[in-house]
Image: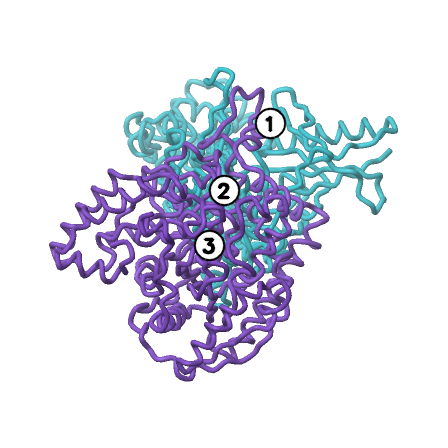
Chain colours: A cyan, B purple
């Protein structure tokens, strides 16, 4: 049977507020257990939540960025369940009246087509703490540092039809929240986590199949692999005439498989009701307008500007605007180099090779944008040629300093003195007298083929320092005798 | 000294007729002597009280004008007090020593008040008789076989018996007013949001409100002055400015319009209680007030509405008592589920468990609309009844409870009868308006409280009306024989 996969995503983005959603405790990562806590985060009797308005501003920014309706009255609700790292016995979230309502965003697929994905809603909620099972023989340790950290849960419509589309969507959300500066996007530290709802249906069928939910996947690669794995698992069951059980599953990246966590029957009745400790949030149109007016440039706008301002191709503009860090890096290189096209080629080409080899993000690059720009300046002014520049970049990557320092230290400066180039070429021709003879005896077509040989010999003799633009005419003149 | 007002004690303290240390010693001695009969305190903080009294004496000597400086008071045992056991009268919190101070107790400390201890109550403020306490029932000082009312029964009994000058209480459905009525003292439930709930262990967050319990309206005014006002730590605390609550106590009542809701005088109201209330209203007429019959048509719906909303909120508020971080944890739990079940099963008393179950049920999927949402709709109707009434009248008066204090054990097996006890008080919490109970007479030897209800943030008006009554009558000066040193 030909199956169509239907995917919807719930993304939890941790908002980059200084303090927590309902307390003044810091949100910093990696502090000693239970030190980033107040009475509120510990669930002390009598403690009351106070809403962090910064989180509200960030949520409204997101809503604007995905063309969504803003909930002018939104309400916090309690989601009740027992868990040792949930100190109050409920999570404060939003249910019937989320801060962000229906919206949408566009993703570009590999073949260049643009697809619109619907956003169902996005709501504010607090994170729970963490249960620590190691180091406490037979017991569980509780760390409440993360308790009450602000999250924005972004729920998509079931609009995605492949793992690639799902990843493109998550990347776009990642890009938007980091552009807005409302989430650091650090998936390894859990700043962005993803629940994947996935079902199959025979191609052409209108009705959705039974779905499963894969919880807490935290990298682009795992999202893609988890989806492939789950599609395969569901297809196997359906092909055998079986039925999919509606359940929550976990993805195990080591075994590349999903495992059942709990079925629908075991699901909690969360008994949502409006939190009586918090007033409904009432927004004014002025407040929303003010945020809309001050929204930073978003990925799509940035890509458009890169095309018009720097004359980049749509593809290049898309790659370079994919993350705010990448875009900022590129623009800095372009500014220093004074040649945006050259900057684009080097960032996407040579630099990306180093990054990919070492599995680093642009923010972790060993070569700063200023350094790379400095290198390109020396290509532009003919101090070095492109081939030499690649060697300089390698030295730069290894921490040997700026382009000028490396060129100086290694004596890589291009030779541009006509007399010096001429005598060097003459030396090469003298050393290859037989080939010169052969060249002179050949017809024009043959000569064109042979010129490459002499060119190579000259560059070799100059250790790459000869300016190829100057070598060609002199070489032609001397060869013809 | 035990039947003196806060104002007169404050004067004596400044005139050096008595020191706060001496006054505190008197009260601590009385507690030691008499509280064995009443059980009104869970914790008596002798040493802390004397240290605070000493500090208060210095404060007064240095010219402090705070009326509460050096006055020995007590707190209901659900206000978190830094370093002092705070139990909510529950086994669940039998060992809980808060690391912080509630706003109410903190403000009273800042006013220089001396804390004698923490008073008994119905467990987690759930009850109308103070029989639901892990630390045992509280007795009514007017008759030791009768209940003091609840849930602030310890505070009411302690004030009535002269075991403190005044006390704090909390009122979720009548828990200040009904025990004030049963024990013959004055109690004020302020407008919801007038007093911060920060540090008050929550029963039903949208209804809970702290207030003063004292020997007179004037004393209540002094305490309200200290505890009322905005607190950034409680999002539901109002930013409406406080008033000078003692400034207009003496304002004449000529032209005051009193509304008498006919629903407060119907079936179920004890005849003797009705007579006391009618006599009190006549007294107000003598003071120049006019009386108007009004209607609060949805009063009968307040019991079902309250007993859905309050338990619903409670079921969630009390989830944090899970044996994980503080409070009671069962012995040798087999696993997590066993720890939850036994810690909560053993730590909570029967009434608390019952309300948690009712609330859990009301919020469950499939029942939420029929119970919780419907109860909220009724709540809006009740509120509208009051808003309409206050277009016509300045204050509303009626009984606090249908009867005087009942016998200990008389209603423990009849929850419906117990819940009906609250018929005249619940709607006030649902609407969020302020109301007082003041002593208005006796029926069969037991005190009867008159309830005075006011518009939102009209605490100063309520206190004025109550004070004028107390100037014209002496019901509030009557003491139970126990308190006379018997």
Q: State which tag comes first along the sequence, 3 or 1.
A: 3
In the visual, does B457 lie left or right of A315?
A: left
Question: Which tag is nearer the camera, tag 1 or tag 2?
Answer: 2
Q: Is residue A271 above or below residue B172?
A: above
**Left or right: where does residue A265 sit relative to residue B375?**
right
List x then y, in percent, for residue A382: 37, 39
> Which of the numbered marks, if any, corresponds to residue B123?
2
Q: Which is nearer the N-term, disc 1 or disc 2? A: 2
Q: Nearer the viewer, residue A452 or B159?
A: B159
Kindly tell me whether residue A305 is visible in this rendering: no
The chain under label 1 reads: B
Residue A465 in picture, x, y percent from top left = 37, 29
Which type of secondary structure does the marked residue at label 3 adopt? Answer: helix
Q: Residues within 10 Å of mark 2 (few under 14, many from 20)?
A: many
Q: CA distance from mark 3 to mark 1?
A: 39 Å
Q: What residue would you read off at disc 3?
A: B179
């Amino acid at each position: 049977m030909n199956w169509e996969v239907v995917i919807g995503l719930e993304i939890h983005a941790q908002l980059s507020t200084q303090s927590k959603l309902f307390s003044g405790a810091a949100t910093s990562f990696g502090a000693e257990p239970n030190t980033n806590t107040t009475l509120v985060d510990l669930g002390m009797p009598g403690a009351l939540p106070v809403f962090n308005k910064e989180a509200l501003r960030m949520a409204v920014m997101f809503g604007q960025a995905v063309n969504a309706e803003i909930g002018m009255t939104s309400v916090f609700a309690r989601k009740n369940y027992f868990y040792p790292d949930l100190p109050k016995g409920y999570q404060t979230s939003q249910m019937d009246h989320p801060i962000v309502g229906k919206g949408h965003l566009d993703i570009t697929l590999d073949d260049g087509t643009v697809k619109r994905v619907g956003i169902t809603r996005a709501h504010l909620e607090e994170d729970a703490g963490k249960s620590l099972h190691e180091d406490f023989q037979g017991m569980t340790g509780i760390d409440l540092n993360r308790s009450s950290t602000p999250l924005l849960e972004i729920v998509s419509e079931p609009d995605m039809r492949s793992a690639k589309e799902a990843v493109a969507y998550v990347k776009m959300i990642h890009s938007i929240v980091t552009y807005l500066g409302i989430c650091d996007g650090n998936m390894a530290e859990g700043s962005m986590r993803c629940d994947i709802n996935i079902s199959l249906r025979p191609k052409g069928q209108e009705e959705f199949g039974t779905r499963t939910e894969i919880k807490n996947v935290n990298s682009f690669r795992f999202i893609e692999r988890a989806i492939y794995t789950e599609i395969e698992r569901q297809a196997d069951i359906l092909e055998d005439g079986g039925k999919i059980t509606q359940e929550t599953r976990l993805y195990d990246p080591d075994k590349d498989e999903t495992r059942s966590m709990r079925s629908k029957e075991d699901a909690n009745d969360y008994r949502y009701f409006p939190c009586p400790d918090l007033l409904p949030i009432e927004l004014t149109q002025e407040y929303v307008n003010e945020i809309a007016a001050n929204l930073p440039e978003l990925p799509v706008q940035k890509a458009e500007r890169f095309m018009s301002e720097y004359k980049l191709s749509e593809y290049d503009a898309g790659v370079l605007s994919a993350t705010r860090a990448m875009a900022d890096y590129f623009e800095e290189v372009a500014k220093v180099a004074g040649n945006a096209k050259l900057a684009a080629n080097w960032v996407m080409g040579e630099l990306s090779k180093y990054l990919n080899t070492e599995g680093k993000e642009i923010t972790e690059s060993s070569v700063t944008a200023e350094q790379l720009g400095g290198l390109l300046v020396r290509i532009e002014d003919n101090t070095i040629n492109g081939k030499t520049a690649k060697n300089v970049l390698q030295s730069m990557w290894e921490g040997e300093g700026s382009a000028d320092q490396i060129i100086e230290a290694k004596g890589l400066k291009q030779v541009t003195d006509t007399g010096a180039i001429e005598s060097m070429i003459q030396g090469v021709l003298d050393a290859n007298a037989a080939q010169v003879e052969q060249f002179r005896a050949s017809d024009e077509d043959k000569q064109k083929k042979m010129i490459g040989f002499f060119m190579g010999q000259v560059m070799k003799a100059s250790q790459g320092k000869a300016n190829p633009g100057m070598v060609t005419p002199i070489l032609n003149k001397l060869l013809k005798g | 000294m035990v039947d003196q007002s806060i104002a007169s004690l404050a004067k004596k303290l400044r005139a050096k007729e008595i020191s706060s240390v001496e006054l505190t010693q008197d009260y601590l001695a009385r507690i030691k002597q008499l509280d064995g009969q009443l059980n009104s305190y869970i914790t008596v903080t002798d040493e802390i009280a004397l240290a605070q009294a000493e500090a208060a004496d210095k404060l007064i000597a240095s010219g402090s004008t705070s009326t509460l400086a050096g006055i020995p008071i007590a707190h209901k045992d659900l206000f978190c007090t830094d370093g002092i056991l705070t139990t909510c009268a529950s086994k669940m919190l039998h060992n809980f020593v808060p690391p912080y101070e509630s706003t109410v107790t903190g403000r009273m400390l800042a006013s220089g008040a001396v804390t004698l201890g923490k008073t008994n109550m119905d467990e987690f403020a759930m009850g109308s008789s103070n029989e639901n306490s892990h630390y045992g029932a509280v007795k009514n000082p007017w008759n030791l076989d009768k209940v003091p009312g609840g849930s602030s029964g310890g505070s009411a009994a302690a004030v009535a018996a002269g075991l403190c000058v005044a006390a704090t209480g909390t009122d979720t459905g009548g828990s200040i007013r009904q025990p004030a009525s049963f024990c013959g003292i004055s109690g004020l439930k302020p407008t919801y949001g007038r007093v911060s709930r920060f540090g008050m262990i929550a029963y039903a967050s949208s209804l809970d409100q702290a207030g003063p319990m004292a020997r007179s309206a004037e004393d209540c005014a002094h305490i309200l002055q200290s505890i009322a006002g905005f607190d950034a730590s409680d999002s539901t605390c109002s930013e409406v400015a406080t008033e000078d609550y003692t400034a207009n106590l003496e304002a004449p009542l000529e032209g005051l319009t009193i509304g008498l809701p006919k629903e407060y005088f119907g079936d179920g109201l004890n005849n003797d209680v009705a007579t006391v209330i009618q006599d009190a209203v006549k007294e107000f007429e003598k003071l120049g007030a006019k009386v108007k019959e009004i209607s609060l048509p949805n009063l009968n719906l307040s019991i079902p509405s309250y007993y859905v909303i309050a338990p619903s909120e409670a079921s969630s508020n009390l989830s944090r008592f899970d044996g994980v971080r503080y409070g009671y944890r069962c012995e040798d739990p087999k696993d997590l589920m066993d720890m939850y079940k036994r810690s909560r099963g053993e730590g909570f008393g029967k009434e608390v468990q019952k309300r948690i179950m009712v609330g859990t049920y009301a919020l469950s999927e499939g029942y939420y609309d029929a119970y919780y949402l419907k109860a909220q709709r009724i709540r809006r109707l009740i509120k509208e009844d009051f808003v309409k009434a206050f277009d016509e009248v300045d204050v509303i008066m009626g009984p606090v409870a249908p009867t005087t204090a009942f016998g200990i054990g008389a209603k423990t097996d009849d929850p419906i009868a117990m819940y009906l006890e609250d018929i005249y008080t619940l709607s006030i919490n649902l609407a969020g308006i302020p109301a007082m109970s003041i002593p208005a007479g006796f029926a069969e030897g037991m005190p009867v409280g008159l309830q005075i209800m006011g518009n939102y943030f009209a605490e100063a008006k309520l206190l004025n009306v109550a004070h004028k009554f107390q100037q014209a009558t002496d019901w509030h000066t009557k003491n139970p024989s126990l308190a006379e040193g018997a």
